Amino acid sequence: MEESAETHRLSVKITRVETIPLSIPLRTPFRIANGPPRPSVEVLLVRLHTGDGVSGVGETQAWRRQGSAETLASLCTVIERHFTPHLVGQSPFALASIMRNLEEAIHHSLYAQAAVADALYDLQGKILGVPVHQLIGGRCRDAVPTCATLTMKDSIDETLEGADEAYAQGFRSFTVKIGVDPKDDVRNVAALRKRLGDDIVIRVDANAGMQFDGALALLKKLEPYGIDAAEQLLPIWDLDGMAELARRVDVPLMADESVATDHDLVEIIKKRAANAIHTKVAKNGGLWGTRKLWTIAEAGGIRIFPGNHPSTSIGTASVLHLAAAWPGPLLDGPFPIGLSVYAEDVVTEPIHMEGHRVRVPDRPGWGYTLDEEKIRKLRADA
Ligand SMILES: [Mg+2]
């Protein structure tokens, strides 16, 4: 009897693909160097249903900045029209062949693939009754430490107040958004270093918003402040410029927008254009694609900064499980940023931070349950 129940569980098939387009308000408009501030983020959840009533959920975003040309409508079209025929009738455990088929259906459709890959992982975990980290090698850490992202405030005092609060919560790694005004950037970094001392890690991120000469001049001025990594100063396509910057300044560089695929990362390693990468499950094709990048990064001597576009607890959980099962070193990353910048979440019991750390859940799948009422309220197509 036991054996036949087991066989039954493994023979479950996907019966329906549901797209759930959401618009999630931000607590305060999000400002980065690249593009105007925005009041909300467009999030797409994909829910894969089975005949047994078990379902799995994955998340992606229509981020619409360098490296992300999708809209909610285009993501829905890709998934409903081009991916669904490769999913319905398939086993949720056929992850590798499904992901190959999706890539063949639409080349480099990583933002759409991300939600499907992650929904498959959640579904596998729910069917087997195990957390996703057990599906990918098992737990290597009980909690994942994270960094604080200091958003651009109107005054330096406000920015430093945010830093003090984060420090009091236990954060020792800080990312300062730069790239709008170099004078402000130097002043903010100098003030942060002075305020919190030499023990904190400071990274800066220009979100691909600078040009070579300005970036070089700024990094020269930031050299005395012991920056751990300067993230994506130059546009997504300028790997040669990044390699040149890396040779000319004593600040390690990190690539974010420039790394979507594994091929992008191989190019960065060959050119020595960065020594760290910021991964995001939506940008990089879900846990499936992101884990591949981490493996290549580790082999190439590239440090790993586990991140995300602002995500609900679902997208946050994807990185949480990936990091939980990663045996190598990780930088304290900003992957739970959505938990602090979104005004709403989509699950019944959202992930909560314990100081600067997130505890790894042991419940099946991601370990989180969608809140149907919140989803109805946040739907972008309501
Ligand atoms: Mg970045």
Image (cartoon, rainbow, N blue to C red):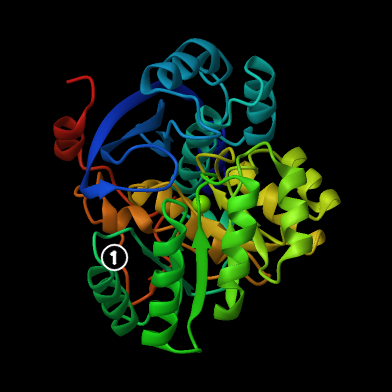
Q: Nearer the viewer, residue 251 or 175?
A: 251
Residue at (46%, 24%) from the top-left corner?
70
> Looking at the rendering, which quadrant does residue 3 occupy?
top right
- Image location of residue 159, percent across then percent down: 29, 69
Q: Which residue is drawn at 51% across and 31% down?
A: 68
Q: Does the residue labelled 1 lie within 8 Å of ligand 1?
A: no
Along the viewing direction, whichever of 171 and 184 lies nearer the viewer: 184
Vertical side of 254 occupied by 263: above or below: above
Secondary structure at numbered mark 1: loop
Quadrant location, the C terminus: top left
Q: Position of residue 267 (x, y in %)?
A: 80, 44
Query: Is any atom of residue 277 visible in this view?
Result: no
Confirm whether residue 159 shows in the render. yes
Q: Position of residue 163 (x, y in %)?
A: 32, 75
Q: Which amino acid does label 1 sit on?
A: His
Q: Kindly identify the residue that appears in the image at 65 percent across and 72 percent down.
A: 329
